[in-house]
Image: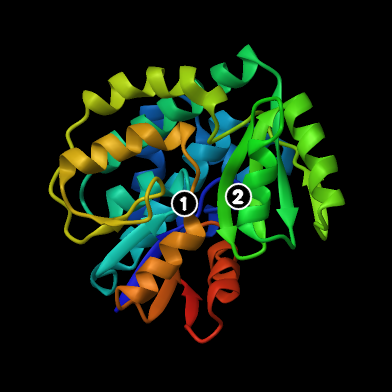
Amino acid sequence: MKAYVFPGQASQFEGMGKDLYESSEEAKELFEQANEILGFRISDVMFEGTAEDLKQTKVTQPAVFLHSIVKARLAGDNFKPEVVAGHSLGEISALVANHVLSFEDGLKLVQQRANAMQTACEMQESTMAAILGLDDEIVENICANIDDVVVPANYNCPGQLVISGSMSGIEKAVEALKEAGARRAIVLQVGGAFHSPLMKPAEEQLKSAIEATTFNTPSCPIYQNVDAVAETDPERIKEKLIQQLTSPVRWTQTMQNMIDGGVSEFIEVGGTGKVIQGFVKKVDRRFPTSAL
């Protein structure tokens, strides 16, 4: 069974999508439709912008989403997912790919998500840090004992867990995790504490937008970030998407549950095409991976 998996933020690259726009009329139409929905020419930023331009949350999230969906659409009849999943932002791409959301509704939610997260980031200075070389349980226990806001945020793969929290919380946790034997503990250059309680204002802002959006019956199950479980009920999918901004991305668990559920091949859709493949290999090298 093939799983189509969709990357999130940090999979953007300069010039992304330009080759698709120039070689396909269908791709060109999707990019132009996105420009109209977003109210600015995101295609210009994607094709000509610098790496710094692409790092802006209001650009990054719709850019990665758009690139993934264009790739999926151009695959035509060859794109027949049996299960899907998406890392953080990529979950919305996955929900368009399995027909829960329309392209237009998906892009609108991505834009509202980006704006809500940006606003939450501006309310309190916060950040994230990548912890390499420690068991998840050790990281969880240390975070739980820090007298400040700091939580596990992205379970990317075995030996790589990203934590999220206030500036002082992250600082304390990084020192404690280094002392506990972390191979590396790197504070990330991000705008805020994604997938933590500090995103509560963004969750509340996005909740009304999600509740007002039509969620259709999926064409195949989606493994969602919040609990790493395959879901097919539109109402449950909606509930778990609302919870996503303040909950950890359980990607390690998602990949393991997919394998246990019969997935034998992972196909990454969009971005650099390397991020999710790398995570899969850390979970189990035996499974073939590719980029669409």
- From the top left corner, tell me how far across and down residue 37 is, in percent: 36, 29
| Classed neighbour count for the residue bearing mark 2: other residues with Cα under 10 Å, few (<14), some (14–19), many (≥20) | many
Q: Residue at x 57, y 66 (%)?
A: 279
Q: Which residue is mark 2?
A: 12
Real-space Cα distance between discs 2 and 1? 9 Å
Q: Is residue 269 visible in the rendered structure shown here?
A: no
Residue at the (57%, 42%) spot, across then down? 153
214 or 14: nearer the viewer: 214
Mark 1 element type: helix
Indicate the quadrant containing the C terminus: top left, top right, bottom left or bottom right.
bottom left
Residues at circles 2 and 1 in contact by the CB criterion of under 8 Å: yes
Task: Determine the secondary structure under disc 2.
Answer: loop
Which residue is pictured at 31% across the width and 56% down the height? Answer: 229
Q: Residue furthest left?
A: 217
Q: Which residue is mark 1?
A: 67
Closer to the camera in the image, 18 or 272: 272
95 lies above or below 124: below
Residue 247: image location, x then y, percent: 46, 38
Q: Is residue 24 left or right of residue 143?
A: left
